Amino acid sequence: MATALDTEDTRAMAKSFQSVSDNFGGSLEDPLPFYRERMRETPVMKGDILEELGVPPIFGNAKGRPVYTLFRHADIGAVLRDEDSFTSSLIGEGLGSFMGTFMLTAMDGAYHRRMRALLQPCFMPPVLKEWRESLIEPVIRDEFIGPLVPRGKADLIKDVGLGFPVRVIYAILGFPDDPAGMEVFATMALKILSGPKRDPEEAMRARTEALAASQALHDHVKPLVEKRRAEGSKGNDLIGRLLRTEHEGVTLSDEQVTDFVRMLLPAAAETTTRTFGSLMILLLERPELLARVRADRKLIGKAIDEAVRYEPVATFKAREAARDVEIGGVAIPEGSIVSMVIQTANRDPEVFDDPDTFDIDRRPKPSFGFGYGVHMCIGLFVAKAEIEAAVNAVFDLLPNIRFDPDTPPPRIKGVGLRGPDSVHVVWDVP
Ligand code: HEM
């Protein structure tokens, strides 16, 4: 039976997903040992480790600013906490240059605080509870996992993980039920993510494509936003909430809502896909743990948190020094770029006991897989609700799920973005 997204557009989406993986994959499948060696020699390193590993930056650096790379949890936490000394506008010159001017991750200071205060209530747990029951759980169970049951085998990325985050966001937004529109929407978002490149010639070509995709996404969203405004901005979906939200007399214009929606997909879809894929691998590799989590579903939340620590999908953060600063005894001049390796911070033995063990029972401590400080992921609860719903549906509907013995074991890989390209599994058909 066909899954919800088994069409030509889905194949285009899978191709774009692969091209994002290739773009940010870099030259090492598992860069952690390499980082650790560097971290031992120079915990605050002058130079751009991403460049060494052939990964395009998410930040812009047309001004040729010096780059410093940080590895330690304490240094990275201090930077992410200090929004006055370390600003984010450089994201707007990189990936953000494809996404209009209303890009939350690239905003700083009072403006970011005001906009975040406007947007945050649209993503809080009471809102989420409604979305979870009426939309997230039924969509994932009935449209993605349910139809797979008689097949007895699947690729959890292509058949499940690639589609559900897009489908859920599309539904949360309150867009019309239009699968073709949704898939075009998703493919465009992935093309935007393929925009940044290292090679200047390739960068020019990819930039043109990413800008065209971004414009197409804008032109798809804007009329829907205007229509909803004209109809009175009603409804509990995200667009309705964004149109009505208000903080200290400030509201969002149609253009701002359109731009926010446009940035949402690249932020929300692909990250959730890869995190779901990595978590499924980490559980399937540990049958005893898998059985324990299956028997006690309250543990799924802990397993997600630990997966985001152990294998963060977003492996780098970047900020710009807004003044002369010193980190770990190294002087960093104003205007420098500070590039932060989340993988080493999340596995820092100074903070996490036995950091290379996947341990869902560890004492919770801040890790940076969902970010940290004022820019911490606004969609955190949405992402966790989606992944939890997907894991629950897998446990309920796919008995005795295990890796497919006829395909090579899946791998979590990549430098700039981490996750598996595929997770082939089989189960007992009831
Ligand atoms: C597992 C899935 C996800 C991961 C790992 C993830 C990760 C992150 C990280 C690391 C940041 C911080 C960026 C920075 O500090 O520069 C961030 C910010 C953000 N995320 Fe997520 N995210 C996920 C899912 C989502 C979802 C589902 C949504 C929306 C529904 C979303 C929307 C956003 C937005 C709008 C920001 C910007 C917040 C700000 O700058 O104030 N993300 N995310």
Image: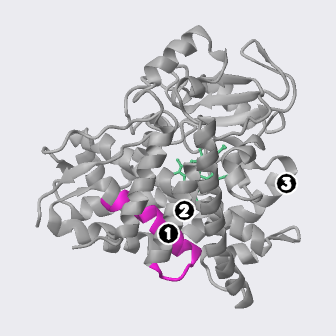
- Tell me how far mark 2 sits from mark 1, CA to CA: 6 Å
| Camera-nearest label, 3 or 2 | 2
- Tell me how far mark 3 sits from mark 1, CA to CA: 32 Å
Give the residue displayed 88% in from the left and 71% down from the top.
249
In the rendered image, which residue does mark 3 sit on? 111
In the rendered image, which residue does mark 1 sit on? 184
Q: Residue 221: x, y in percent?
A: 64, 74
Give the residue displayed 79% in from the left and 59% down from the top.
115
Q: Residue 173: x, y in percent?
A: 58, 73
Find the magenta span and give its range. 159-178
Ligand 1 contact, mark 1 (Cβ < 8 Å):
no
In the rendered image, which residue does mark 2 sit on? 188
CB contact under 8 Å: marks 3 and 2: no
SS assignment for the magenta stretch, majority = helix
Question: Foreground residue, 176 or 307?
Answer: 176
Disc 2 element: helix
Tag of residue 280: none
Inspect this view and state whether residue 329 appears. yes
Left or right of residue 379: residue 392? left
- In the rendered image, which quarter is residue 285 located in? top left
Seen in the picture, residue 170 relative to 315 is either above or below; the reply is: below
